Image (spheres, helix red, strand yellow):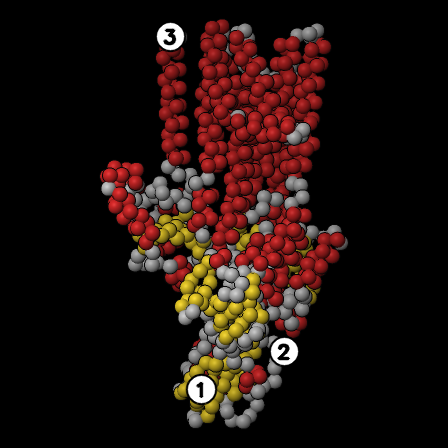
Amino acid sequence: MAATLTPSTSACAACVVVPSAEALAGRRARTQSRLMLSVPAVQNATSISEVERLLESVPGVRSARVNLTLKRVSVDAEGDVTAEDLVARLAAIGYPAHELDPGLLSVTENDKRGRDLLMRLGVAGFSMMNIMLLSVAVWSGAEGQTRDLFHWISAMIALPTLAFAGQPFFASAWTSIQARRLGMDVPISLALVLASSISLFETIKSGHHAYFDAAVSLCFFLLAGRYLDYRSRAAARSAAEELAALEVPRALRLEGAQETMVAIADLRVGDLVRVRPGARMPVDGVVIEGASEIDRSLLTGETLPVQAVPDTVVSAGEVNLTGPLTVRVTAAGKDSSLHRMADLVAVAESARNRYTSLADRMARRYSPSVHVLALTSFLSWLWISGGDVRLAVNIAAAVLIITCPCALALAVPAVVTSASGKLFRKGLLIKDGTALERLAEVDTVVFDKTGTLTLGTPRPLALQDQPPAALPVAMALAAASAHPLSLALVAGLRDMGMTPAELSELREVPGYGVEGRWQDRRVRLGRAAWIGAEEAAETATYLDLGQGGAPLTFRFADSLRPGARAAVDGLRAQGKNVMLLSGDSASAVQALARDLGIADWRAGALPAEKANVIAELSAAGRKVLMVGDGLNDTAALAGAHVSISPASALDAARVASDVVLLGQDLGPVADAARISVVARRRIKQNFALSLVYNLVAVPVALVGLATPLIAALAMSTSSLMVTLNAMRMK
Amino acid sequence: MEILSFLIPVSLFLGFLGLIGFFWAIRGHQFEDLEGDGHRILRKDYDDHPKTDRTGG
């Protein structure tokens, strides 16, 4: 199939002879493109079909393939198919999507290390099964030459296997010895080497016991743990890469009279950039032409749009609302305010990276004791038996095999894999390996308001209290503009069953509002100053009916994010303190706090104040979970014990947080807190299980009763129990 | 017991066959979307564009 769809150059012998064919192929490769979209809402077979069928019905799309595990769709298309178009089409059938940068993602896709580990795991598994088959015969009493033959065959399978499959452990043990540390891999490598050499020696001497089966199954179980661990790390890393790729940064540069689409990295200070209505500021700059309103809510948390006229300073991340603006670049890319914020975040984060996980603490205590135990048993048996080195080494090897942290190595990765898989299905992406553990310790949850608990989209209030005659006029005026307040007003009035009035001479005045002519009177809808109205405290727009009376005020409130109430209630039910911390005005914050039943709220908080509040809480011994989305939250997000941000959040905020919410619904936050507590409990149970197993098995090994059969049985059962315990996560 | 000299190579050979199959599956990117493949088999419509080696993502 691959050959018919995409003939590769190597398969085409004529290409070498006829260079034009290759050139042709190259030209075709340029006009076709590979688009990558993140579609978090894909859930099951039906949605796979819906998404693929829709995308393949788009003219120019050659094929679309959903990857359900990663919740991505890759699209092979002609050059003129744009990601924006596909995203819009997907959104129309209920699948919100983001474009991803395929260049950044390709690294994780053809991921060599993961496949390498999987291959070693496969080889170890194959050898383990074969050696176990032979061992069963030995355990059930094969004698003499048969036993020797079986031992020899086992050796022939086991030694190459260990040399190949054990490499990750040997390599990491060697580096830790060079750094003069005793990691977990040192006793592992020691056990593997010691067990296989003593077994080889016994085989040559036609002894009774050989530990080839134990050595290989040890290797297999440890590799399984290593692979699971790698998988969750890779998922975390690809999450970070995916987010970096989430916003493909482009800008419209003005070159004379021409507009060209360029990457932000190519912009220089002094360039002129056109920002269309509805677009986000790509750079920091100064407005030199045009009039509009800009939405700063992502940066400051205030919901009220700000007027933009020439000489207004704008920063990257703000949204242009009504009119086109021409902006002179003052800082782009690495120097822009967004990136400076990201650098600050990196500093705050490095402090958090010092967190030591349960597994680290366990390994630090456990690893030295393994060595001491094995050495003690060797020396004491040497003394008891009066210098029988063969016996002493045998027992020391048995002790090493038994104490090797087989179940311990599986205890954490199995739980983390199972928990983060569960959370991913609920729409939560874990970016950091220790985030789950930190989430489990949380006792205080701090929410941002705008864009987090609310969607940042306005909803008109008390429309039925307005004079009924004014409403059709307001609707007709609002319908002429794409301003978010106008859109909300039209939607609200349509829900009331209104139809717009007949207006003439409708025109939008960018940055101010809309005006028109109604029954020979000039009517206006827009900013307070333009209408001549008294400015209200909350977000509002004003209507002048041209009758000389006082202008009408339409007030707006932010609409609640779906699941916000469930999240707040769920977290409170788990006994956590919930707090609201916003940069918006006191009246708006208070209304929302009262609505959600949050007693503890603060309004008008500047970014630094937010970070301070978090720092004070942490200093008081609280473990804080910060949920936020704006640039004003980034410092707080980075400073908190653990942090969550929605996918709609600004780049910097997503980078700063440990967990990203892929869907719109905020409800999974409460689930995440619950699941993390369960996961932590499972990890502790797993540690307890493997310790109990050691307490039982080590004395057996110490007195020299650990036959290969007992070692193999103990190892498999403990690993199996730990894995099963991890999998019963609900 | 002479049968062993015959059976052991046979069992090893079969095991190797399985191992080679496993390698082949890894090379064919068959482990990249386990969940999706599980759901895909339940669909009613025919898969017109089965996954190729190149479109593994």
Secondary structure type for disc 2: loop
Give the percent coordinates (x, y) of residue B42.
Answer: 36, 46
Between residue A657 and residue A29, name the one nearer to us: A29
Dots 2 and 1 on the same chain: yes
Q: Residue at x 57, y 34 (%)?
A: A410
**Residue position for label 1:** A516
Q: Amino acid at mark 2?
A: Ala
Give the percent coordinates (x, y) of residue A656.
Answer: 60, 53
Q: Quadrant of residue A192?
A: top right
> Subunit of mark 2?
A
Count residues near mark 2 (Cα–Cα under 10 Å), then give few for <14, some for 14-19, many for 20+: few
Q: Amino acid at mark 3?
A: Glu
Between residue A502 and residue A185, name the one nearer to us: A185
**Residue position for label 3:** B2
**Residue position for label 2:** A537
Q: Amino acid at mark 1?
A: Gly
Which residue lies most toward the right here?
A620
> Subunit of mark 3?
B
Q: Give the side of residue A69 with respect to residue A612, left or right.
A: left
Q: Is residue A639 visible?
A: yes
Badge 2 vs badge 3, beta-carbon distance below 8 Å: no
